Amino acid sequence: MHVDLAVAWAAIIAFAVFAYVVMDGFDLGIGILFPSFAAGPQRDQAMNAIAPVWDGNETWLVMGGGGLLAAFPLAYAIILPATYPLMIAMLLGLVFRGVAFEFRGRDPRHRHLWDFGFCAGSTVAALAQGMTLGAILEGIPVVDGAYAGGWWHWLSGYSLLTGAALVVGYALLGATWLVWKTEGELQAQARRSARRLAVATLAALAAVSAATPFLAHDYWRRWFEMPGLVLTAPVPLLVGAVAWALLRGLRRGDERSPFLLALALFALGYLGLAVSIYPYLVPRSTTIWDAAAPPASQAFMLVGAVVIVPVILIYTAWAYRVFRGKVGSAGYH
Amino acid sequence: MFEHLDPLILARAQFAFTISFHFLFPSFTIGLASYLAVLEGLWLKTGNGVYHQLYAYWLRIFAVVFGMGVVSGLVMSYQFGTNWSAFSFRVGPIIGPLMAYEVMTAFFLEAGFLGVMLFGAGRVGRGMHCFATCMVALGTLISASWIIAANSWMHTPTGHAVNAQGQFVPAGPWLDIIFNPSFPYRLTHTVIASYLTTAMLVGGVGAWHLLKNRGDAAARKMFSMAMWMAALVTPLQIMAGDLHGRNTLTHQPVKVLAMEGDYAPSPQGAPLVLFGLPSDAEARVRHEVSLPGLGSLILLHDAKAPLPGLTDYPRDTWPPVAVVFWSFRLMVGLGLAMLTVGLWSLLARWRGRLYDWRWLHRAAVAVAPAGLVAVIAGWVTTEVGRQPYTVYGLLRTAHSASAIGAPALAMSLLAFIVVYGVVFGAGILYIIRMMARPPGAAPAANADHLPQRAAGITPAAAIVGAPPQGGVAGSARRGP
């Protein structure tokens, strides 16, 4: 059987990035919303909803980055220098986010500072990730297989829009996760936020969708001409249906469906993205075949990935199962 | 305002800074994870509460150190691309898959079971919890193996070819790349170093509490366990270091000559330079204090064996000799200090004074950070000794960097220094505070009715079956 290794690895990395976006997305979203929760048991409860799983969720980001280096070194070597300040900002944001889990419990006198760092770090990381996406979609100048732009090239109205959109979207994921995992006042607060954020996410999705086809003719053609049209045409309808179900679920007091429907919104957005980009890794300059590592490298990793990734998914699911049910605010009784 | 700075030096400074900070954390957690697995295993086997007390004590510290290791490690996985994109493009096909395997076989394993290890004591059985601890410990060792394989390949590249685009690509079996000539030596030396680092810190903390209260059963236990490690493992480490050094002499002679300060060739056998001031300009060690023949005796196990000198090799293949020379001496000196304490503890044990020889306890406190410092010194020796190459002999550091301007590099370096200084400075302070708390005492953070840790439950209470304090454990009964 013939396997196009480059396509297989593009699919694995796309999966890792999507896993990261939805799983760390709700972690970061809770960070973004953190100031809206009352200090004390509410914040502790919000933290407890993600403390046992955030590290595993973040690991998908290492998988996405490491996988890109290994399978598509050229793309890695172009995209990271092109988005240099965004990458540094994201990493530093994730430093503040990650240490807050332990530090805020270790130092009650400065807890408000680590809480601030948790929120600011989460927000900066989300914004930087969204802006990176925007910068890639807009196009990266490449000459002789290397980035050939300045160090502010990534900054534009469009990348700011995608950055803001991802912050809003992550916040929606975070709020709906809390609706699922918490109860009482915090859950009520999360539900109120989720309703507003669902509307805001729809608006952001619409704004990005409206702006993207005008970036370059190629996107326009992919979205509105055959065969892309077959995939893109149902998307707005599906988005509308999912959004309607999401808002209805929140109004009715559903606990699980809002999170799952928010995931569905992300999946639809991601599908639109895939239609826009494939088979490029760096739009209009570098395809997955241009950037591919030699077959010996991709095949070696593929053997491992096919065996190990399912095992990872099994024990990750087990870990989530161990912590199923509502979280408490711990110690507060 | 930074335009006049050299981008290459800035990129190297940034990598050196972020990786040195990062390396502190795993070099502690690799050993500590294994120690926790041993403690929990002993507790399950013997039912002795002291083991459980120590497990709970060190788990709290582990959580903080591990968290800092995770966030500083994430930075490393992206720094290859931001600052070293030319290296990433050319070497990605070789070291990328090794790092991808590290993520798939180690990072997910650690992260997946860490949550259960830290917060799951009230939610899974004791055996399952111990299994989670073992998986985290196993993950740290698997992680070390892959990353050291990648690093070793940069020192002693094998099993590759260079393609038309100038990329290093696999040629032949992957085992040739993974088991490159320096890998077994480097891995052994590094993993033992982590165990020794942990032993010194655990022993130092135990000794500190013995100085305050020599009846503290938990302090006695941890001090005794740590001193067994120090006494037995330090000599092993010196042997491993000797083998690693001789392996380096075969594959990277220039590095060893820089470590030794041997500028001139020694046809009749090289002396051991104890101290002096290496001067590349004069190509000699000024104010040299040396022992004749001992250098060859150590490296070649023959005092009369001839050894080349740095001047036998082109100047543009020398590393910065003074850095390598001094960091190596620092590492060896600290190793000897750790050996002394280890042997002293054997004497104390033999004379029945392990728990009341106050000068031994003071010495153990003094060498508590010796392992950490020695790890960094050793790392500097081997990595600076690899200069001026990233892939030894094949790819120069100057040809590895991204085309990022000095202003961007300088700004990001400053940001890293400020953020790491604040965040990890605070973290290290918290660790020291936790270490200062006696192992027998109940944790104090519950005083304000706030959670012990992020997810709230005190694993100790939950494991021994004390009533859950609410939170995760309490809500388990309410959950659907």
Image: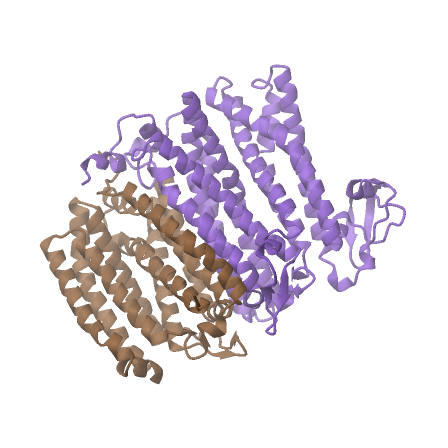
Chain colours: A brown, B purple
Q: Position of residue B417 (x, y in %)?
A: 51, 55
> Measuring 58% from the left and 24% from the top, which residue is drawn there?
B361
Q: Is residue B358 visible?
A: yes
Say which quarter of the image contains residue B310: bottom right
- For this orientation, the residue located farthest to the left is A252
For the N terminus of chain B, give its image quadrant: bottom right
Q: Is residue A16 left or right of residue B412?
A: left
Q: Position of residue A266 (x, y in %)?
A: 27, 64
Q: Is residue A140 above or below residue B191?
A: below
Q: Position of residue A276 (x, y in %)?
A: 33, 75
Say which quarter of the image contains residue A140: bottom left
> Measuring 55% from the left and 51% from the top, which residue is drawn there?
B147
Q: Is residue B163 above or below residue B417?
A: below
- For this orientation, the residue located farthest to the top is B352
Q: Nearer the viewer, residue A151 or A60?
A: A60
Q: Position of residue B197 (x, y in %)?
A: 57, 37
